[in-house]
Image (tube, coloured by chain):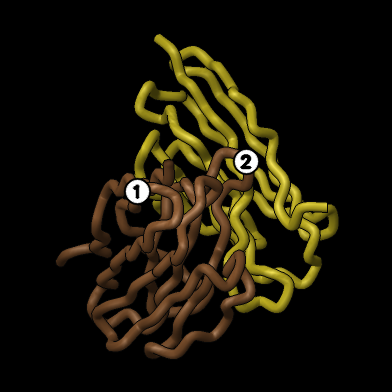
Chain colours: A brown, B yellow
Amino acid sequence: DAGVIQSPRHEVTEMGQEVTLRCKPISGHDYLFWYRQTMMRGLELLIYFNNNVPIDDSGMPEDRFSAKMPNASFSTLKIQPSEPRDSAVYFCASNRDRVGEQFFGPGTRLTVL
Amino acid sequence: RKEVEQDPGPFNVPEGATVAFNCTYSNSASQSFFWYRQDCRKEPKLLMSVYSSGNEDGRFTAQLNRASQYISLLIRDSKLSDSATYLCVVTGEYGNKLVFGAGTILRVKS
């Protein structure tokens, strides 16, 4: 069974550009989470969805970040405009239970120049 | 105060050694506790859940002390392949999400 799929795996862009990260959760998982990991701040929860509905977006740093989940098998995290401080690894994770084991994708390593 | 605090290490130990990590958490209402493992440039993966009675999985033992609000992980007979970052994870303030510690780096050397 395929795990969580993320694309792209690496993204290098220039400040001011729009960035879209994509995630396909494990089939049958009702919860989807977006995290950001940096050396300084560790792993931070940005937003999570339940049955495609955003439940908690309190971790989204600012209005430049937005996330959608149009259906059970696809979610996007968009940054517009991107800034150098957005450089990080962005992970998507899914699970059946909000506080059970979470299965992480391989992450997208974002570099904003 | 951070919700979950860990000693970042690194812990440098020889093969075969026993090593222990501790983690403290601030939310006394937390109900679920875990240890995740993250290899360099990889995603985190669940190592084990932590139960009130303590639990063991092979060379790994996890303990929970609710009164003192700390969690421990003991690794016996360390292997080179145990080298990784170990993340302490608890449920957050309202029990509705997981909060990750910054991680403890373990390096096992031959």
Residue name at image x 33 percent, y 63 percent: A21
Q: Residues within 10 Å of mark 2 (few under 14, many from 20)?
A: few
Q: Amino acid at mark 2?
A: Met
Disc 2 secondary structure class: loop
Give the letter of the chain under mark 1.
A
In this orientation, which residue lies closer to the viewer: A33 or A16? A16
Q: Which numbered marker is on residue B24? A: none
Could one spot residue A37 in this view of the protein?
yes
Q: Is residue B44 left or right of residue B100?
A: left
Disc 1 secondary structure class: strand
Could one spot residue B50 in this view of the protein?
no
Q: Is residue B19 left or right of residue B15?
A: right
Q: Please identify the quadrant where the C terminus of chain B is shown.
A: top left
Give the letter of the chain under mark 2.
A
Q: Is residue A106 left or right of residue B78?
A: left
**Percent x, y for residue B64?**
69, 54
What residue does disc 1 label? A13
Residue name at image x 56 percent, y 24 percent: B18
Q: Residues within 10 Å of mark 1 (few under 14, many from 20)?
A: some
**Percent x, y for residue A1?**
15, 66
Residue name at image x 23 percent, y 78 percent: A27
Question: Quick check: marks 1 and 2 in contact, CB under 8 Å?
Answer: no
Q: Farthest left residue?
A: A1
Q: Taking A86 as reference, is A65 above or below it?
A: below
Q: Amino acid at mark 1?
A: Thr
Q: Taking A8 as reference, is B93 above or below it?
A: below
Residue name at image x 44 percent, y 13 percent: B109
**Percent x, y for residue B27?**
78, 65
Q: Taking B103 as reference, is A35 above or below it?
A: below
What residue does disc 2 label? A40
